[in-house]
Amino acid sequence: MQNESGHLTDKAVVTDILNGNVQAFAVVVKSTEKLVMQIVNKMTSNVDDRKDLVQEIYLKAYRNLASFQFKSKLSTWIANIAYNTTVNFLQKKKIPVTGIEGAIEEISHLNEHPEQETIKAEAVEILHEAIGKLPPLYKTLITLYHLEELSNQEIAVITELPEGTIKSYLYRARKILKDSIEQQYKNQ
Amino acid sequence: MNSNHLSDELLQACLLNELQQDDMVDTHLRFCPDCRKRLEEYRLLFTHIKEVETEPYAFDSTALVMEAVVHYAQKKQKRKALFYWGGLLFLVVIIGSFSIPFIPAVLAVFRSQSLITSLLFTGTAVAVFLFLWTDLKRQYKSKEEQLFKNNLQPKL
């Protein structure tokens, strides 16, 4: 899991930044922004909130860079900061991170577009909408696992959740998504 | 749903290759059209999910972050410089105030000597001070280099 060459690159970049080369931090941002944005975008919808969160996440990473111990990849460490910062933000706003009940209800009303051009395109669109309706944590887990192709172990480091819990959340989220596609086919 | 059917967890695990070869599962799938259908639905889900497009970024995150990081680094640098010069000034004031009672005695020594001797004393003192100051700076620089170029390399 822990790529040796990736670690060496991380080490070189981190040392460079710690030696005072602030601009080298742009390399870190460029290489991790997709992962960070996946987490932030999946858990929040307001552009201003996203901007604030992205700034806060990277400032935290920059301030605490000296404490990074290379026990994981730098991207995983930053993703962990992103996840915790975003969850804290949601908790402050009293937005539930895992509540699934409302989501199931909403997803069951997604399949009201029988005029789509192709079944597949519709399925992908329905799926996109259904993922959007999932609770923030489920959405993030699905994205990290299926789109970012991270392992359960890496997701566990990022979210600080036990692997078993992650698997169980992923099973539930996939079942909801499968049911939403199934419902769509039934309606055609 | 019939409890004899394969669970959703099991079907997902089959597709994710998280299961060891299981003849019972294989046999069940061969003879159960319901479970085969559900397995196929999951297979479709796993295919389609990769085609879901990632939301495009609404802003340039690198520019946004670097602006904040550079601003923070500059502020930190200023704070560090302020702390350094403030500390130095404080030290000078403290040493100066402790030296006040000794000033008349020192001046008396200078007054009792000729001008050339006084200048010689002062010149020597300034030369010693400059020598010590330069040496101190040189030592500080070499220690800083050692610290950043060697010891800060993180160990795996």
Image: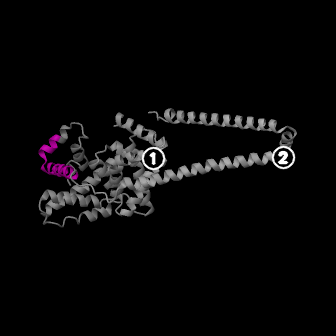
Q: Residue at x 83, y 41 (%)?
A: B106
Any mark on residue A85, and which?
A: none
Mark 1: few/some/many CA within 10 Å (<14, 14-19, 20+): some
Would you say residue B13 sits in the magenta stretch? Answer: no
At numbered mark 1, what does the secondary structure look like: helix, strand or loop? helix
Left or right of residue B136, residue B114 in this image: right
Query: Which residue: 28% across, 45% down?
Result: A149
Name the magenta segment's main secondary structure. Answer: helix
Tell me: residue A180, above or below residue B81.
below
Front one among A90 and B152 = B152
Badge 2 crowding class, 10 Å Cα cut-off, few under 14, some 14 to 19, many 20 or more, is few
Q: Amino acid at mark 1?
A: Val
Q: Is residue B154 above or below residue A87?
A: above
Residue A99 is at least partly visible in this image? yes
Given the image, what chain letter belongs to the residue carrying mark 1?
A: A
User: Which residue bears the numbered disc 2?
Assistant: B101
Classify mark 2: helix, strand or loop. Answer: helix
Residue that carries the numbered disc 1 in the rendered image: A22
